[in-house]
Image: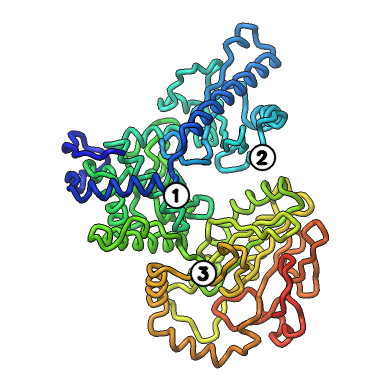
């Protein structure tokens, strides 16, 4: 973490020339030292003890998979010599391979095995059974139908994401070079995706001019993205590899810059980036192996991608295909926020902690979707929640589709749980707002009941569903957000001056001159009963949208009694129950009862 002056880079990295070859000034060196201290104080570096433990766990997993392959080799009748030579190799990728993992982070691992050991039966059943019988292994969760099939578990407390790739070799040598394209011969697409995690990580490190500066900058921006609520590939934002590729491109454009400069340039460049122009570290490789590569000129589907960030290893893919128009809007706003703070830091008008202030999601919208996930026990909830979370992005896309993009969603990639609930419970939230600049008729509402019902049908396809696994989707207003999502249950935590400024700016940009008119209209058209009522649409795994006189439980007798009022708000999910009925009828959501 010691910074020093560097000479101009003699080698060009990337598909274009650098934007600047300038090195750091004394002020840049000072700002980088302060940034490094902030990252250390924030606890982003693990201890030597944890580092040593991770290495021990990887050695142990290596021995387990080797024994597993030898066992299968023996069972299938191969010779004693083949059994002796049988082998499997463990590779790491993701944050661990890039050298930017922090305390408690999982280790992305890939097991490469011989051609006669397959993924479906041998990996997800035989190895799964071996792991499930081990005392060190907990929270074992196989996800065979994921885009990249994975087995998740904890080994002696260390979180592991384990992939498997069967290559066209009878014996896998310990020194197998998986960066060589020959490793992709005669393998299926899930195997290609599994192998490419490691191949991409190696290429990223190869294509940056200074690995240590890259690592510090990436560690900083990953932390920033988590604080600002835009770190999650599964919900339509960006995951670890996406952020790594974005940072690597900035390192190429400013090869002699140090971390404080790179962080500032990151926001400056991506605030102005004209998406969907792609971010690429190198020219696309063309190979004759028959795998599809990202190419919007040839592939119509690739033209629909909103924020293409292209992987550098063959076959090159868009790593950010999950990004939607709504999540791109949110990230663009956050890039602008980061750019403003970095400009202030360079003018000595702000310090680094201001950049990492948590995003006040529950202060940013008037309307939200609350998605409650329940199950009979913690093991069922873990698998059920993983499935539902992987489908939440589809709900965002469906709402965009069914409202012609006029209703924008902001899925928040943080999970919440109500500790007072007797059943196993998890909740996610989405902010809702009209598209900026959209002309809306007075009193117009968005009815997304059919959208939610379609989402329910897609979620109900879960192959491992068991009784007690349920999902409930409700429309809630800001003041109805449950207290358990706030620190210490305090809904009225004071906002910092930065948050207040950000909120005022956002509201002005969104509402413009219509704010005062809308408020006057709402005061006239909304009765006191309407303003305080709750408008849930409750979606049940087996029954769909529940009527107001229906009941359900969360597997342990706890009653859910939804109602469906009509409310004059910007976004509604339903409109059947009259507002007057709410004065007599209690509203119960997940066991918390209140009167509307």
> Would you place residue 234 above or below residue 11 in this image?
below
As helix, strand or loop, the secondary structure at mark 3 comes to loop
Near mark 1 (Cα within 10 A), the count class, few <14, some 14-19 or many ≥20, is many
Q: Residue 526 location in percent, x, y?
A: 59, 88
The N terminus: image quadrant: top left
**Residue 89, horizontal then vertical, whole percent:** 53, 22
Q: Nearer the viewer, mark 1 or mark 2?
A: 2
Label 1 SS: loop
Answer with mark 1 or mark 2, whichever residue precedes in sequence: 2
Residue 139, disc: 2
> Which residue occupies the foreground of this view, 590 or 82?
590
Q: Which residue is mark 3?
A: 493
Which quarter of the figure has residue 545? bottom right
Dot in front, 3 or 1: 3
Instruction: Name the residue beneath numbered marker 1.
Output: 320
In the image, 213: left or right of 240? Answer: left
Q: Disc 3 to disc 1, how far (Cα)?
A: 35 Å
Residue 516 x, y percent position in the rendering: 44, 87
């Amino acid at each position: 973490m010691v910074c020093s002056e560097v000479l101009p880079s003699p080698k060009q990295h990337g598909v274009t020339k650098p934007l600047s070859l300038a090195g750091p000034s004394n002020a840049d060196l000072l700002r980088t030292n302060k940034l490094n201290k902030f990252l250390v104080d924030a606890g982003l570096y693990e201890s030597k003890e944890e580092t040593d433990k991770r290495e021990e766990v990887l050695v142990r997993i290596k021995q387990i998979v080797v024994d597993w392959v030898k066992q299968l080799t023996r069972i299938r009748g191969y010779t004693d010599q083949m059994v002796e030579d049988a082998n499997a190799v463990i590779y790491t990728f993701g944050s661990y391979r890039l050298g930017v993992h922090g305390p408690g982070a999982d280790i992305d691992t890939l097991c490469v095995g011989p051609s006669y050991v397959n993924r479906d039966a041998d990996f997800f059943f035989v190895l799964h059974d071996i792991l499930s019988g081990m005392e060190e292994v907990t929270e074992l969760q196989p996800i065979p139908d994921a885009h990249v099939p994975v087995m998740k578990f904890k080994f002696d407390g260390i979180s592991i994401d384990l992939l498997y790739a069967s290559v066209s070799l009878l014996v896998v040598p310990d020194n197998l070079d998986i960066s060589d394209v020959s490793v992709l011969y005669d393998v299926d697409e899930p195997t290609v995706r599994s192998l490419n995690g490691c191949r991409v990580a190696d290429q990223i490190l190869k294509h940056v001019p200074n690995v240590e500066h890259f690592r510090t900058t990436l560690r900083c921006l990953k932390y920033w993205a988590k604080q600002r609520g835009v770190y999650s590939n599964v919900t339509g934002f960006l995951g670890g590899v996406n952020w790594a590729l974005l940072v690597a491109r900035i390192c190429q454009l400013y090869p002699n810059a140090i971390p404080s400069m790179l962080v500032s340039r990151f926001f400056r460049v991506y605030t102005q980036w004209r998406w969907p122009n792609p971010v690429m570290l190198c020219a696309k490789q063309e190979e004759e192996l028959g795998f599809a590569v990202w190419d919007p000129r040839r592939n119509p589907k690739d033209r629909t991608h909103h924020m293409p960030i292209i992987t550098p290893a063959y076959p090159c893919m868009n790593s950010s295909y999950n990004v939607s128009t709504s999540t791109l809007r949110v990230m663009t706003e956050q890039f602008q926020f980061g750019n403003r703070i970095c400009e202030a830091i360079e003018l000595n008008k702000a310090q680094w902690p201001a950049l990492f202030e948590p995003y006040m999601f529950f202060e940013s919208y008037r309307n939200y979707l609350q998605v409650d996930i329940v199950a009979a026990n913690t093991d069922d909830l873990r698998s059920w929640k993983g499935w539902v979370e992987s489908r939440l992005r589809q709900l965002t896309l469906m709402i965009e589709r069914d409202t012609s993009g006029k209703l924008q969603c902001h899925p928040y990639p943080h999970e919440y749980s109500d500790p007072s609930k007797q059943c196993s419970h998890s909740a996610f939230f989405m902010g809702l707002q009209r598209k900026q600049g959209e002309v809306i008729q007075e009193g117009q509402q968005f009815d997304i009941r059919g959208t939610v019902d379609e989402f329910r049908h897609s979620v109900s396809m879960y192959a491992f569903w068991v009784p007690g696994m349920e999902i409930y989707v409700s429309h809630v207003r800001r003041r109805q957000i449950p207290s358990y999502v706030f620190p210490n249950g305090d809904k009225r935590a004071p906002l910092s001056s930065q948050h207040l400024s950000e909120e005022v700016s956002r509201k002005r940009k969104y509402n413009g001159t219509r704010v005062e008119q809308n408020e006057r209209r709402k005061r006239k058209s909304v009765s006191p009963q309407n303003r305080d009522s709750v408008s849930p649409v409750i979606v049940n795994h087996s029954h769909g949208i529940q009527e107001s006189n229906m009941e359900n439980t969360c597997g342990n007798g706890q009653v859910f009694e939804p109602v469906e009022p009509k409310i004059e708000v910007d976004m509604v999910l339903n409109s059947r129950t009259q507002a007057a009925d709410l004065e007599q009828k209690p509203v119960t959501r997940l066991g918390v009862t209140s009167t509307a």
